[in-house]
Amino acid sequence: MAKKENRKRIEILALSGIPEVAEGDNIGDLITDAIERDALGFCEGDIYVVTQKIVSKSEGMTVPLASVVPCSEALSISLKTGKDPRLVQLILNQSKGIVRLDEERGVLIMETHHGFICANAGIDASNVPGEDTVTLLPRDSDASAKEIHQRLSGVIPVNHFSVVISDTFGRPWREGHLNFAVGSYGIAPINDYRDTIDAVGKPLNVTMVATVDIVAAAADLVSGKATNTPVSIIRGLDYESSPLGINQLIRDREKDLFR
């Protein structure tokens, strides 16, 4: 009889029935309620992937454009790009600086205060109730992930688990959007293979795998804006626990070959 192989198995589970999130809602409570409702249980090593939109909503990072007064710079950029000057003002407020301004296509690529390089500083109007209302990124996505983790720690019966906050970014040189991690807690953001040996005995000198980005992208296979499933669980993945956050993935400017 052939020996049975020890196969690894990873599951990606979407949580259903999470209601519209409002300021002050506790994301940890919404997650536990959904898990109990879906009878999914709690397992050691579960990774809870939470979309940025509901985190921002719960933290009050929702802004009506009617409340924004654009400055002269915002007005100037608005004339060049065709964007609403109030939106441009919010983009400037949320950014360290402009990486690329494409007047012809009306594109603003920004470096956010977090260090992310993305369109419109991550500001988004989709799935936000109210006309001319947008959501901003959380002020500190790692702190948001830690807060959700701490809330879950007090109510779920496992010790080893983690939280990843995801958002959708475009990518240079490739079409299509992809989910990236914008915050994390309880999981090492990077799996560093440097100074190890590959399968044929050669040393690895530069290989560092962005584990939390892979997790965020995988979760998007079952969750999403259109399906009202803003939280999912990655179950069965082996990973190293860590209190380090997404800052570990931000490349220092002196190492950036493109700016």
Image (cartoon, rainbow, N blue to C red):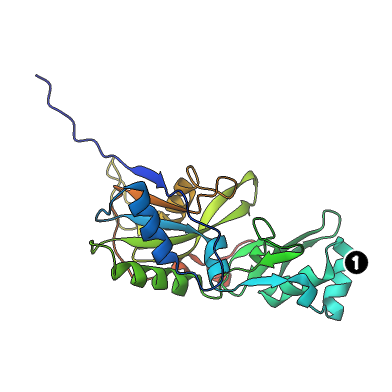
Task: Decide which of 54, 250 is in the foreground and name it.
Answer: 54
Find residue 174 and report its image quarter. top right
Across and down, in percent, residue 172 comes to 64, 51
Q: Is residue 121 above or below residue 237?
A: below
Q: Mark 1 Cα within 10 Å, few/some/many (few <14, many 20+)?
A: few
Q: Residue at x 34, y 42 (%)?
A: 11
Tag 1's secondary structure?
helix
Q: Image point 57% across, 61% down: which residue? A: 53
**Amino acid type at image mark 1:** Leu
- At which x and y percent is residue 246? 46, 67
- Image point (19%, 35%), residue name: 6
Is residue 258 left or right of 107 when viewed as pictured? left
Residue 24 pos. (x, y %): 51, 74
* Left or right, 98 with reference to 59: right
- Quadrant in which residue 127 is drawn: bottom right
- Apparent side of residue 40 relative to residue 125 in the rendered image (left or right): left
The relative height of residue 178 versus residue 240 in the rendered view (above or below) is above
Q: Is residue 30 visible?
A: yes
Q: Which residue is mark 1?
A: 79
Q: Quadrant of residue 95?
A: bottom right
User: Which quadrant would the C terminus be assigned to in this image?
Assistant: bottom right
- Location of the N terminus (image quadrant): top left
Q: x, y percentage for residue 229?
A: 50, 49
Q: Taking 237 as reference, is 19 left or right? A: right
Farthest residue toward the left?
1
Outermost residue, right direction? 79
Give whichever of 36, 114 is nearer the camera: 36
Q: Can the viewer see residue 189? A: no
